[in-house]
Amino acid sequence: MLKKIKKIFRWKSLCSKYTQNMRQEIIKVRSKLEVARTQVDNSNVHYFNMPKNRLDTLLIKNDVIWKLRAKTNWFREWDLNTHYFHVTVSSRRKVNRIEKLTDEFGAECRSVYGLHHIARDYFTSLFQRSSGVRSIVINLVPRSITIEDNVVLTTPFSYDEFKSAAFSMQADKYPGPNSFNPSFYKHF
C-alpha cells in the first residue's frame, strides 16, 4: 500500500511539472494565434490554422491531465478510507437529495410520503394518453396518398395475394423476423 502511495505522489509531481510546462506552452501558442489572427488573409490561412490546431490539442491534453489528477486524488483518498472520502460522499448525497417538491396546485411538500405521491402523480400524468387536438397539426401535413390509393392500401389482403407475393420472392433470400426464409413459406 505504501509503494502504491509513493508511486501516486511521484506521478503527481511529474504531472504538476508537465502541467506547468503545458500552461506556459498554451500561453505561447495563444500569443502566436493572436499575432496570426491580425495578419491572416486568403494566402496565409495555413499560418493561422497551425497554432489554432496546436492550441486545441494542448487544451484537450490539459483537460485530460486534470481529470486524471482528480481521479488519482480520489483513488488515493478513497483507498485510505479517510475523512476526505466520507465528507465527499456525504456532500454528494446532500447535493443529490430532493428535499421538496411542488405539486400541480403550487403547494410545497417536504414529507417523504408526500414526495413519493407527487413524483408518482407527475409521472403517471406524464405518461398517460392525453386527448389533444391533433387535427390542427395533421391538417398542416400535405397529403401524399390519394383517397383511392388509401382504399387499396387498407383493404384486407386475400390468400391469393399472399401466395403470389411469397412465390415471387427468391427462395434463399434473407429470413424474416421469425427466422424463416421465403423457401420455408413456399414449401409449406
Image: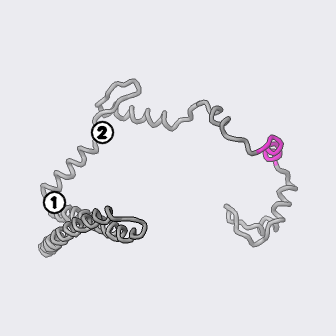
Residue drawn at 39 percent across, 70 percent down:
44
Is disc 2 surrounded by few (<14), some (14 to 19) or many (20+) residues within 10 Å? Answer: few
Front one among 111 and 94 = 94
Does 11 sit left or right of 105 as displayed? left
**Residue 149 in magenta?**
yes
Number of dots carrying numbers: 2
Q: Secondary structure at mark 2?
A: loop
Does 184 sit left or right of 14 as displayed? right
Q: Secondary structure at mark 1?
A: loop
Residue drawn at 31 percent across, 29 percent down:
109
Q: Mark 2: which amino acid?
A: Ile
Is disc 1 surrounded by few (<14), some (14 to 19) or many (20+) residues within 10 Å? Answer: few
Residue drawn at 12 percent across, 55 percent down:
83
- Find residue 132 and report its horizontal and vertical position in percent: 59, 31
Residue under circle 1? 81
Residue under circle 2? 98
The span picked out in magenta is: 145-156
Report the predominant secondary structure element of the magenta stretch.
Answer: helix
Residues at badges 2 and 1 in contact (C-beta under 8 Å)? no
The quarter holding residue 70 reads: bottom left
Q: Mark 1: which amino acid?
A: Asn
Q: Of the numbered discs in the image, which one, if any, rests on residue 128?
A: none
The quarter holding residue 122 reads: top left
**Residue 130 in magenta?**
no
